[in-house]
Amino acid sequence: MLAVEEVEIMVQSRPSRSMDELVEAASWSGGIKKGRDWDVVEERIGTALPDDYKEMMGRFPSGFFRNAVSFENPIDSRVDLDDFVRNRVQRTIGALGNPDLEYLQSTDCQVFPQSGGLLPWGNDLQGGIFCWRTEPDDPNQWPIAYYSADFLKWFEHDGGVVEIIWEVLAHAGRDNILRRNLDHEQPVFRVPSTYLGGGEWIANAGYR
């Protein structure tokens, strides 16, 4: 458990929102290009992963929600699995566990693969990191731990990935795990894209 002085907890009973609710909230009608099965990914990472996350990866390719929650999809053929494991998982774990960077200062947290350690799955495009706290043993009960670079502190949410993303899309003002007012951002999902200005985006090569 993260130390009380470093975390605020948002209690959310499980199960979370359905995948159809998330797809509707994100105005998404596309799909993925599946390149590998989950057993390959989980073996490389070293653990089973939550079912809601895996279901979401079956519907959404790499991209970002409301310009606030970004991730890469490890089962999509457009994602290099070696690069994903090395740079998105292991490098982030290394940064979190580096005492010089003070991510875990004044907390009792550890990093994966230590018991209950933090395992990253995404970021907020502004220096923040989304992780699972890998306890209890059932991955479907793992809470979300989010490090905010705005507040230099951790926030914990008892819901799963789908629930916190639905809240980012559907809630107004700062009523989300980021404590960030997103009213100026369209509540949509975008594949990896480049902003052209004037509210216009163009999907990156491979996602058009």
Image (cartoon, grey):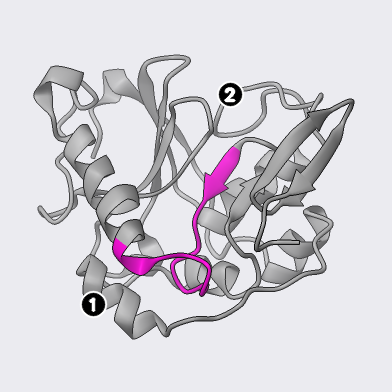
* Residue 57 figure quarter: bottom right
What span is colored magenta in the figure? 69-82
Horizontally, residue 133 falls left or right of residue 123, namely left
Residue designated by label 1: 43
- Does the stretch in magenta take in 78? yes
Q: Residue 96's x, y, as percent?
A: 22, 34
Residue pictured at 29% horizontal, 65% vertical? 82
Q: Residue 74's x, y, as percent?
A: 44, 67
Q: As drawn, which residue projects farthest toward the top?
A: 151
Q: Residue 59's x, y, as percent?
A: 65, 72
Asked if marks 1 and 2 touch (Cβ < 8 Å), the reply is no
Horizontally, residue 122 falls left or right of residue 111, namely right
Horizontally, residue 188 falls left or right of residue 43, namely right
Main SS of the magenta part reads loop
Q: Is residue 187 visible?
A: no
Residue designated by label 2: 179
Count of numbered tags: 2
Residue pictured at 48% horizontal, 15% vertical? 150
